[in-house]
Amino acid sequence: MTAVVTGLGVLAPNGVGLEAYWAATLRGESGIDRLTRFDPEPYPSRLAGEITGFDPAALLPNRLLPQTDPVTRLSLVAAEWALADAGLDPAELSEYDIGVVTANTAGGFEFGQRELQNLWSKGGAHVSAYQSFAWFYAVNTGQISIRHGMRGPSGVVVADGAGGLDALAQARRLIRKGTPVVVSGAVDGSLCPWSWTAQLTSGTLSTREDPADAYLPFDDRACGHVLGEGGAILVLEDAGAAAARGARIHGRLTGYGTSFDGHTAPERGADRGAGLGRAARQALDQAGWRPADVDVVFADASGTPAADRAEAAALADLFGPHGVPVTAPKTMTGRLASGSGPLDVATALLALRDQVIPPTANVRRPAAGYALDLVTAPRRQPLHRALVLARGHGGFNSAVAVEAPAA
């Protein structure tokens, strides 16, 4: 069975909704700015990609609001939009024919911080009963499943930034084993002081104050990355079932690869090229592609010089120097934890649809030694196949091959 994508639901710092996000991305419009969720002044990193113009009270039942972390609310809405985009009403299918697989990195971190503050300042009687599940890694999968009555094979994947691609791969496996529909992907992020303090220990966050100068992967001035919130939820279906109901198909997930480097130190980023390259080769082999078949690569784009150098080396080894156009539109959103991979897959499908590669924003001086054909302005060219890469803290590497419907 072939897994196809029939629905896309997107929430990103530079665009709420699929087409709003895509239009902003092609304009090179960034959603990165100074943090407003809390006062960032005491911290060395003060920028983030925050989602604005999103009112959960207007989109979700009131009863859900006190139960859920902000990221869960985003996930619920993205799933609603993905199902609507797919033209799919879960009530018309058997509840066991639809599964849910999402990725997550920290659960409801913001919700958890608030309840911990209540615990230590007021006592246990003031901790919400919803804390028992609102913090949990699987909460987004659970809430989406409950809201739509989806009781097919489900789960959650935790692999930091690589987890979103891993979730899509698991959804693809479930479809190949006979589940007709799986809602999958990730909307992620935790912009609160508790999370911020933890993230700063990585030593990989940019400390620059200018949003246009803070996250510059593959640039001579690269100095780390910016965090954000958001991502994409996708509806994956068996190709035969989708065709039978006349569904519009955004594209196909044709290959997946993964590897694990087994270390956490960012200064060892030079070690990571081999593992990432192995994941990319696995994805191409599973898709039945040669490197020359790939029209564009959506890079992981760490923004730290050692990790950028490793990724560039892996791409040069696989495709040859300057061998394939490479882009990183996440420079306009920040890195969205496990949400970045699914958002890049959605962006790749839009690029295949409109035959245009979106830009890597703000990069003006691509590092000459990386031997990359880095796309820094929208580039129109024939596009049929894309490779999406993602890495996670700790040494996770994942790659997904996506193909246009008619490719």
Image: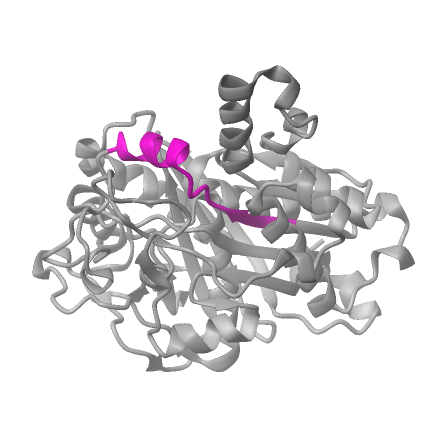
Q: Which residues are magenta?
A: 184-202
Relative to 23, residue 9 above or below: above
Q: Position of residue 65 (x, y in %)?
A: 68, 46
Q: Position of residue 205 (x, y in %)?
A: 25, 43
Q: Position of residue 153 (x, y in %)?
A: 76, 38
Residue at horizontal 40%, vertical 72%? 25
- Residue 159 placement, left or right of 156: left
Task: Give the quadrant of residue 167.
Answer: top right
- The residue most toward the front is 122
- Residue 235 shows in the view: no
Residue at horizontal 44%, vertical 37%? 160
In front here: 317 or 32? 32
Asked whether residue 358 is drawn in magenta, I would say no
Q: Position of residue 184 (x, y in %)?
A: 63, 49
- Residue 263 placement, left or right of 102: left
In front here: 199 or 69? 69
Asked whether residue 194 is drawn in magenta, I would say yes
- The residue most toward the bottom is 380
Residue at horizontal 79%, vertical 42%? 146
Residue at horizontal 76%, vertical 53%? 61
The quadrant of the rendering that contains the C terminus is bottom right
Relative to 261, residue 120 above or below: above
In front here: 86 or 40? 40
